[in-house]
Image (cartoon, rainbow, N blue to C red):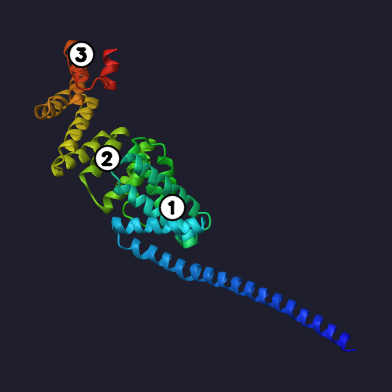
Amino acid sequence: MKGRYGLELYYHKKRLAVFGIIALISGLFLITFLSFFLVKLFRDKVLNSDSVSSLYSNWDLHTQEGYKNVYNTSLELLEEKPYHNAALAFHGFSSFMLAEYETDNQKAQALLDEAIFSLRTAMRNCREKSLPQIEYMLGRSYFYKDKISNYHYYSDLVVKYLKDAQERGYVSDDIPLLLGLSYASLGETDNSIAAFTQALLVRESDTLLFDIAKQYCKNEQDSVAKQYLVRVLETSSNEELLNSSHLLLGQIYINEGNYDDAEAEYNYILQKDENNADAHYGLGLIYESKGDSIKARAEWRKCLKIQFNHPGALKKMS
């Protein structure tokens, strides 16, 4: 009996030992799991919330350094969560702002591509109240991409996103001006004039007055265009803009058949800058209209000597 009792006791102790080992392993696994969960919870709820807070606080600084911090912090958040909506939006915002500071066009274009990708991705799941600002920044990004590339491939997207932002109630002083310039590049003259006129109510500038004059000239409303050009000539101190205004006035006078005033505009420019190709081209048009082809071709040769690929002069001399 003792032998049997001793054997049962042995197996009982063995079973207890096995159960103890299983319980220990289970306990260790549970502790490991809880530790992992708590660390992840801490990181997601505390560290990430701190990171999101830093996005707002650095953005509010409105400095290049602040935008760099937003850019880097948002990038770190996106490495962990590629569809973190706040990080996507702020990464888009900061990429655009850093592109404006960038002096290297290639780097600026790369930053704008980042901005556009991040903002378009953020639009998919953003809150309703955040959508207008994202649309506005997306419109600005496309506008600046056009500006630094000297092409207008994205003007339609500038109009789309800025109009969408406006329709959702977003207000920014620069929207009418950006719309006016984008409509102009699309050849939508009436819409451009309407947007520029609204921009004038916000802030008048010599550049804006000239831009409106150009659109009225394209719309064959020369008398209105002249009124704006006179205001530019009265208020501006920008020599390049003043020359452009005299050139446009010269073209308007030619359209009206007022060759004497047109010639006076071109000669005024050449007195200050005898190497102005457009002024020589304009004089050539005047001489052509007066039937003096010899003087006209002489002016166009001067024009091509200054600017060998001047389209108007090339066409006249071909």
Write the residue at 86% across / 87% down: 5
Give me the C-alpha separation between circle 3 and circle 2: 31 Å
N-term-proximal mark, 2 vs 1: 1
**In the picture shown, does residue 291 fall above or below 233?**
above
Residue marked by disc 3: 297
Residue extending furthest right? 1
Q: Specify the quadrant of the image occupied by residue 235.
A: top left
Q: Work out whether mark 3 precedes mark 2 in sequence or the reverse, and give the earlier one.
A: 2
Front residue (pair 8, 126): 8
Amino acid residing under circle 1: Glu
Q: Which residue is mark 2?
A: 211
| Whole-percent x, y for residue 249 in the image | 20, 32
Contact? badges 2 and 1 (CB < 8 Å)? no
Measured in 3D between alpha carbons, the distance from the residue under mark 3 to the one under mark 1, in whole angstroms, is 52 Å
Q: What amino acid type should be assigned to the residue bearing mark 2?
A: Asp
Is 259 displayed left or right of 127 in the figure? left
The residue carrying pointer 2 sits among few (fewer than 14), some (14 to 19) or many (20 or more) residues within 10 Å by Cα, namely many
Q: Would you call the spot at circle 1 few (<14 residues within 10 Å), some (14-19), or many (20 or more)?
A: many
Q: Which residue is mark 1?
A: 135
Of marks 3 and 1, the one in the foreground? 1
Mark sitting earlier along the chain (3/1): 1
